Image (cartoon, rainbow, N blue to C red):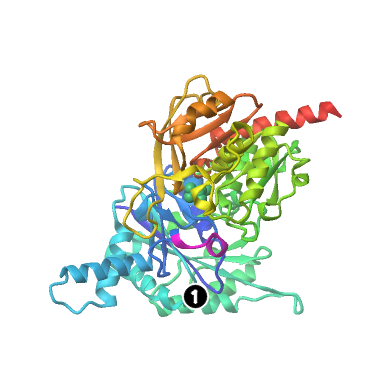
Amino acid sequence: MAKYIFITGGVVSSLGKGVAAASCGALLQSRGYSVHARKFDPYLNIDPGTMSPFQHGEVYVTNDGFETDLDLGYYERFLGIQMSRNDSVSGGRIYWDVLNAERRGDYLGATVQMIPHVSNKLKEYIGANTDTDFVVCEVGGTVGDIEGKIFLESIRQFANDVGRQNVMFIHLTLAPYLETSGELKTKPTQMSVRELLENGIQADMLIVRTPRMLTADEKAKIGMFCNLPAKNVISGIDVDNIYKIPLAYEAQHVFDIMAQHFGLPNATGNMDKFHKIENYLSADLPVVNIGVVGKYFDVPDAYKSLNEALFHAGIQNNVHVKIHKINAEQFNPDALSGVDGILVPGGFGTRGIEGKIAAATYAREKCVPYMGICLGMQVAVIDFARNVVGISDAGSAEFGKACTPVINIMADHDSADMGGTLRLGAYPCMIKPGTLAEKIYGTQQISERHRHRYEMDVSLSDEFEKCGMIISGLSPDGRLPEIVELKNHPFFIAGQFHPEFQSSPYKGHPMFNAFIAAAVKNSLCAKNKV
Ligand code: GLN
């Protein structure tokens, strides 16, 4: 039977529960245990697909086509495991399930209540199909939130059902430092742990976010008030890179605390992959400058997986990647003059679209390495149609203006729910032999994740190819262009999918790795010219 670790948070939101959950999982994996992870979000949206990146950060997409919380991206990246639709469960989805069951008559006339009907449904999701040694479950929100109550109640019941020895509660809190009194304050932590206890949950370990390491006295005080051994109080100090967190936990014996709790044998972990990243971070390496032409820059998490994938490709290429955020809505080509590579990421709606098209034009004309992701492929196609093929009013059906739509809706992307008509999740793509795409992937069939509504019109292929834009990736039925590239260009490639969702910190992603390699080459050329 699997053992369960529940991660909750108190005092404030944004304490980094996702990374904490992934890091605890990584410590278990480093001792050879198999780990799965799940995220529970108390909010009422059925899934995060309809939430704006301006509010909620990136929407992460799983292989099975579910739009999920971005924390699932941490789990996949840290743990190298695959997430699916049952690993991101919101309050809305639970209520939806329960209310649908009620309408179907499944409850046989019973009064449908929060306990047991909602709590049982939640427990079903917590315990669903797991064949791993451990399941790490993160509960979103902050202890004390009204909509979170039923989640706490359900994890309390779950621990009671499966046996307390099979469950560990890890709670993240905050200890603010008061400049004026020169003190680290533990009261918010005490109150948050008490609030958790009011819900019947005794924290087994605390990760206290603090600006500096907790002293032995502070740990003893927190332990005493919070009813747990001082050694189970961990300092969650800020680090400049999230991949240092598993190492910080390792140094504070977090595995030993978990092992003691669950009665596991002592074991030394192999943390090499994290040390490798740590060494890379401190190494004095050349810097490659990448211009990302997008529009969601005010939200730090909106391009989370993209930033990660660029970072991973930097590790693979032994360079530091510096991202230059270029706002497509006030696009000025001068902003691209010093960059070694240009990336246009995914996006929705018309805002900034002409700036993105202009960025593709710039990359094509000036022979700067270009990588386009989803909308970034669509704008590359539009630029090429307008300025090379000669379709001067080329555009996309998405932009609502009269145009010749080279990017258009495909009638058969249908789905009944709210995300409707989006092509979501992993789809196979056949790669044309002898192309840059084949060189990059080293194979002729790949699978990449999608999240979009519009597609390049495949009937344009011949005309485009004659002019120098090759459709180097196609859906197996030949109807949907998946990758385009330019014949006469050092590196210009764009995919209708989101390769960033499959990038790993330990090996990068072929397309990002190749893009950064091309940008490095370009920067070396530029240096030779001066
Ligand atoms: N807005 C475009 C579409 O729906 C691209 C989406 C994206 O970049 N994820 O097709």
Q: According to the image, label 1 marks what residue?
A: 193
Is residue 475 found left or right of 469 in the rendered image? Answer: left
Q: Residue furthest left?
A: 108
User: Which is more toward the observer, 120 or 394?
Assistant: 394
Instruction: Please tell me in which quadrant of the rendered image residue 100 appears.
Output: bottom left
- Residue at the (49%, 53%) spot, across then down: 22
Q: Is residue 207 magenta?
A: no
Tally the numbered discs: 1
- Residue 474's spot in the image, x, y percent? 43, 31
Q: Is residue 53 magenta?
A: yes
- Residue 152's spot in the image, x, y percent? 39, 72
User: Which is more toward the observer, 412 or 346?
Assistant: 412
User: Which is more toward the observer, 377 or 381?
Assistant: 381
Is residue 495 found left or right of 37 in the rendered image? Answer: right
Q: Which stretch did the figure color magenta?
A: 50-56
- Residue 104's spot in the image, x, y percent? 17, 67
Is residue 278 found left or right of 334 in the rendered image? Answer: left
